[in-house]
């Protein structure tokens, strides 16, 4: 199958003091900060860059100065602007050709024009949010009209809206400077996966002017993940639009917006861990296709005449575990006849009536939520590269070098961390065993060509570390394997950029984020997923939960098969997602199946209709929920479980 300024310190201290819903829910923010060039930034651990990582260095390779005085626009564009298709604005670098992996070492990079991607799949990597700063010149021409906003960093450019796969922006600050009221800090566009993480977007303007901090308002944003984000200033902190596709946000801080903190104008949004300090509304959800799931949020600093959350008559909203402070009203909704929650807190809210097929409590399952365990990167000098044992990518050549043995030798070398340098087409023909002292296998956008037939590509076995991390990388087109990873141990597994999964040993914990995955088969596991994209005609259901706990923050699907099947007393909680049946090839299938188990679901459907949204069996009796019984092909909350 294809597997494809002190001000910041004040904010951070305040954030740490108000971890109201779920202590530690906002784990990305801590009181400790790192300072660089007069600014303070969150102390997220940046991705280390070991020798031979394969990224193009904008200083040593492209002549960027990063001194905060020299205009580095041309140097940055020489790689960000590269792409295969000149008609789409793509250029080529005289030495490196088309560049996807770009590293900005510590420094302040002054720019005077938009940095627009000339091709897809860009990975823009900094040295840390307090170390790498892209800053717009003060009073810069082209960024003066708030009615015609101009983007500083744009990861889409002219790339086709639904084919911009796997974009990554990490460990940096984007500063639109002073006197640039029409500036948009970052337009983050990605498809079928991609992450914006450990990023600060700020306006240094004394009046906090700027149009939008983070924008996702061009056609077909997502699916993807935004995590560990801080936005300060701007008219709108985050603005997302378009009904196709969906985005997931986790651990987001907003402060000092002039109009609204987070505005969703038609997208399907899952958001956990929002911390807002604003006098204006923190959240606005509007539009006939707008669907928002908001959990574990603290919305403070509000004005007495404002509502913390605004939902229009067309919007679908589910909110849970929200605390507010200073606002006149916690939540207003004009949907389904209108509702208001005076507050200050919102325990649980659904803008539309709760749906069910059997007698069930009218509230979500509320499964326990855990963040992935932190595994420090450690001493990079002790890391081992698969290239040191002979692995090399094929870059699409017919004659391919089999890297299976090289991968296994690197893993069995005794290193705790093994890495895969950037490159396309590392051929693997047999199962690679993850064992011994190894605690992390990390890829720097190294793309694997899997040729293992029905066997798994990776097999996690018992080893020295109780937690194993499989991080980064991806698959070339045409890869074939039984599953990407087979979990044959009770060791906790953390997957970043996961593909497909099954376990042969039950009773473990699994954490997944930003995956393009099918199948996912969990047998009596505890599972937490932050964004997953499933697409298949052959696999039915895409995701199986047998007797375990499955928690999903955001899903996007395609094709016409069942999305999630829950069996054998399992418990499944889906917090937001877009079920996009873009075409029907095999035939009708229910979106969700529950046999003698428990589930609660928040979602929206689009495209070719699913005639049946839920098929549920309890006590030997089977019932179905047709599309006509939903709220415009969506469920702000469906529940199917017996009361406890």
Image (cartoon, helix red, strand yellow):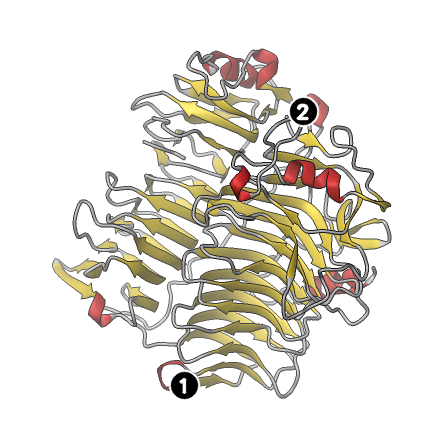
Circle 2/circle 1 CB separation < 8 Å? no
Is residue 302 found left or right of 222 in the rendered image?
A: right
Percent across and percent down for residue 310 are 51, 78
Residue found farthest to the front: 87
Is residue 211 found left or right of 595 in the rendered image?
A: right
Front-lying residue, 415 or 39: 39
Residue at 49%, 66% (x, y): give it. 294
Is residue 594 found left or right of 479 in the rendered image?
A: left
Figure quadrant of residue 214: bottom right
Figure quadrant of residue 54: top right
Secondary structure beneath dot 2 equals loop
Residue at 85%, 49% (x, y): give it. 37
Percent across and percent down for residue 267 are 45, 63
Of marks 2 and 1, which one's residue comes earlier in the chain?
A: 2
Percent across and percent down for residue 555 are 40, 53
Secondary structure beneath dot 1 equals loop
Question: How far apart are the alpha carbons under marks 2 and 1?
Answer: 60 Å
Height in image: 249 above or below 504?
Answer: below
Residue at 57%, 18% (x, y): give it. 386
Front-lying residue, 547 or 317: 317
Residue at 36%, 34% (x, y): give it. 503
Height in image: 335 above or below 469?
Answer: below
Q: Can you identify the residue that label 2 sits on?
A: 95
For residue 338, which numbered disc appears in the image? 1
Which image quarter holds the N terminus? top left
Percent across and percent down for residue 156 are 55, 48
Mark 2 vs mark 1: in front: 2
């Amino acid at each position: 199958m294809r597997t494809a300024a002190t001000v910041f310190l004040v904010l951070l201290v305040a954030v740490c003091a108000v971890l109201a819903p779920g202590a530690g829910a906002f784990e990305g923010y801590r009181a400790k900060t790192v300072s660089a060039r007069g600014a303070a930034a969150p102390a997220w651990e940046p991705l280390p860059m070991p020798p031979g990582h394969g990224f193009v260095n904008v200083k040593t390779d492209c002549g960027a100065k990063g001194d905060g005085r020299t205009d580095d626009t041309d140097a940055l564009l020489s790689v960000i602007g590269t792409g295969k298709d000149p008609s789409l604005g793509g250029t080529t670098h005289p030495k490196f050709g088309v560049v996807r992996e770009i590293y900005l070492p510590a420094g302040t990079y002054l720019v005077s024009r938009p940095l627009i991607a000339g091709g897809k799949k860009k990975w823009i990597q900094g040295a840390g949010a307090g170390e790498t700063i892209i800053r717009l010149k003060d009073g810069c021409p082209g960024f003066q009209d708030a009615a015609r906003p101009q983007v500083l960093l744009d990861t889409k450019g002219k790339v086709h809206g639904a084919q911009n796969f796997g974009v990554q922006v990490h460990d940096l600050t984007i500063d639109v400077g002073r006197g640039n009221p029409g500036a948009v800090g970052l337009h983050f566009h990605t498809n079928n996966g991609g992450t914006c993480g450990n990023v600060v977007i700020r306006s240094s303007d004394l009046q906090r002017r700027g149009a939008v901090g983070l924008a996702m308002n061009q056609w077909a944003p997502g699916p993807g993940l935004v995590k560990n984000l801080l936005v300060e200033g701007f008219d709108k902190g985050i603005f997302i639009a378009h009904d196709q596709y969906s985005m997931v946000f986790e651990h987001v801080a907003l402060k000092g917006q002039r109009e609204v903190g987070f505005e969703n104008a038609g997208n399907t949004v899952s958001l956990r861990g929002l911390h807002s300090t604003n006098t204006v509304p923190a959240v606005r959800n509007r539009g006939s296709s707008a669907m928002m799931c908001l959990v574990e949020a603290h919305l403070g600093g509000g004005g007495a005449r404002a509502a913390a959350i605004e939902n229009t008559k067309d919007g679908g909203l589910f909110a849970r575990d929200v605390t507010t402070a200073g606002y006149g009203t916690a939540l207003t909704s004009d949907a389904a006849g209108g509702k208001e929650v005076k507050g200050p807190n919102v325990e649980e809210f659904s803008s539309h009536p709760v749906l069910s097929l059997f007698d069930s409590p009218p509230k979500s399952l509320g499964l326990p939520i855990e963040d992935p365990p932190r595994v420090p990167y450690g001493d990079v000098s002790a890391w081992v590269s698969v290239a040191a044992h002979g692995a090399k990518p094929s870059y699409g050549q017919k004659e391919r070098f089999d890297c299976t043995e090289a991968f296994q030798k690197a893993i069995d070398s005794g290193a705790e961390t093994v890495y895969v340098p950037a490159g396309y087409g590392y051929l693997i023909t047999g199962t690679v065993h993850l064992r011994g002292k190894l605690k992390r296998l990390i890829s720097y956008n190294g793309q694997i060509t899997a040729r293992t037939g029905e066997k798994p590509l990776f097999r996690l076995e018992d080893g020295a570390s109780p937690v194993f991390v499989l991080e980064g990388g991806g698959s070339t087109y045409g890869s074939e394997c039984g599953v990407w990873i087979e979990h044959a141990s009770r060791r906790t597994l953390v997957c970043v950029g996961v593909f497909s999964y099954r376990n042969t040993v039950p009773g473990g914990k699994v954490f997944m984020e930003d995956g393009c995955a099918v199948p996912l088969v969990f047998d009596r596991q505890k599972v937490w997923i932050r964004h997953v994209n499933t697409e298949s005609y052959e696999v039915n259901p895409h995701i199986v939960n047998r007797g375990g706990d499955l928690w999903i923050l955001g899903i996007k699907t395609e094709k016409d098969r069942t999305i999630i099947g829950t069996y054998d007393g399992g418990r499944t909680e889906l917090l937001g997602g877009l079920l996009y049946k873009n075409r029907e090839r095999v035939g009708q299938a229910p979106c969700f199946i529950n046999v003698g188990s428990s589930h609660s679901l928040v979602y929206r459907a689009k495209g070719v209709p699913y005639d049946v949204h839920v098929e549920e069996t309890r006590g030997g009796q089977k019932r179905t929920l047709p599309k006509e019984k939903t709220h415009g092909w969506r469920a702000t909350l469906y529940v199917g479980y017996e009361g406890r």
